[in-house]
Structure formats: structure tokens, C-alpha cells
Amino acid sequence: MTGDASGAITDMLNACDRDKAESMVIADAFLLEVLTNRANDYELSSTIAMAVLEKLPQVQAVAFPSTRASGGLCFAVRIDEFWKTWGLSSVRRVRATHLAMEYYRLTEGRHVEGIGNSGNLVWQGEPDRADMVLPLEPPWTPVA
């Protein structure tokens, strides 16, 4: 959705009778819990993300925390229009050492310097700094 999403939601809730508005708020709280609670099942999270894409054509992607990889994100993406508005701006790999409480020390970082037409990654030769970002200019999109 573009623009002020909170305004659109407020308008939608104000247009409903009280019971329907309460039902929508409860459903929203349930969806938030399912998509953000690490203890939840991947199948349920991905099913809900796909249902959002199916019911809301204006939504191009839904992101939610991974239940399988601590600190990771999952994306459910509507691929038919995705590459018209999105691009890959940076790719990096690191060695992550868990310190505590979801904090990590990142070492041995390397960036992708380029991506070939077939999608092959061209990795930087030397390790870089942990706080470094090497952008792809322009952002990469697959060749049609």
C-alpha cells in the first residue's frame, strides 16, 4: 500500500460498525502474533503471508521473522510485479558468532561486487570491515 497506511486503516475502521471494527482489530492482533512470534510454526506463518497476498492485491511483499534462523527474515513476494519496483542493492556474507540475547559478532565479511546475467555472484576478494556496505550500482534486477 502506498501513502499513509495508518490513515487508511483508521478510515476503514471508522467506516465499520463497532462489532466489525473490533473483529478486525482482534484479527489484526492475531496475525501480528502469528507472524512475529518465534515459537510459531513456519507453515502457519507462511500460509498467513500467502493469504494476505491473495486477499490484498496492492501488497507486493510480506516480511516476517524466520522461525528457523535466528535474526533471519522470510519474505512472501508477489513475483509478477516484484522486479518492476524492487532491486537487489547489496549482497554480503559473514561469519556470525552468537554473543548473547540475539547479538552477534560479524567477521570475515565479503560483498558481492557484481551479479552476472545468469544470476552468478562475483564475490569480493578480501574480507571487509564488519560495518561496511558495498552497494550494487545500479541495484540488480534479473534480465527479462
Image (spheres, rainbow, N blue to C red):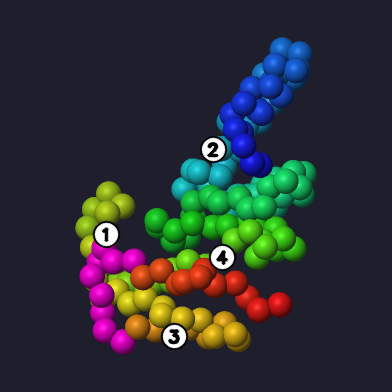
Q: Residue 33 has which mark?
A: 2
Q: CA distance from mark 2 to mark 1?
A: 25 Å
Element type where label 4 sits in the image? loop
Earlier in the chain: of badge 2 and badge 1, it is 2
Q: CA distance from mark 3 to mark 4?
A: 17 Å
Mark 1 and mark 3 in contact? Answer it, CB < 8 Å.
no
Q: CA distance from mark 1 to mark 3?
A: 26 Å
Specify whether 23 is left or right of 122: right
Picture coordinates of residue 139, whole percent (x, y): 52, 69
Picture coordinates of residue 140, whole percent (x, y): 54, 72
Q: Residue 30 has which mark?
A: none
Q: CA distance from mark 2 to mark 4?
A: 29 Å
Please state which amino acid type lies under the numbered disc 1: Tyr
Specify whether 120 is left or right of 94: right
Residue under label 4, please give it: 87
Earlier in the chain: of badge 2 and badge 4, it is 2
* Residue located 31% across and 87% down the image: 125
Residue under label 1, please give it: 104
- State the residue in front, 7 or 65: 7
Q: Which residues are magenta?
A: 125-133
Mark 2 crowdedness (10 Å alpha carbons): few <14, some 14-19, many ≥20: few
Mark 2 and mark 1 in contact? Answer it, CB < 8 Å.
no
* Residue located 76% across and 17% down the image: 16
Residue 113 highlighted magenta (yes or no): no
Q: Residue 122 has which mark?
A: 3
Mark 3 crowdedness (10 Å alpha carbons): few <14, some 14-19, many ≥20: few
Specify whether 109 is left or right of 32: left
Please state which amino acid type lies under the numbered disc 4: Gly
Which label lies toward us, 2 or 3? 3
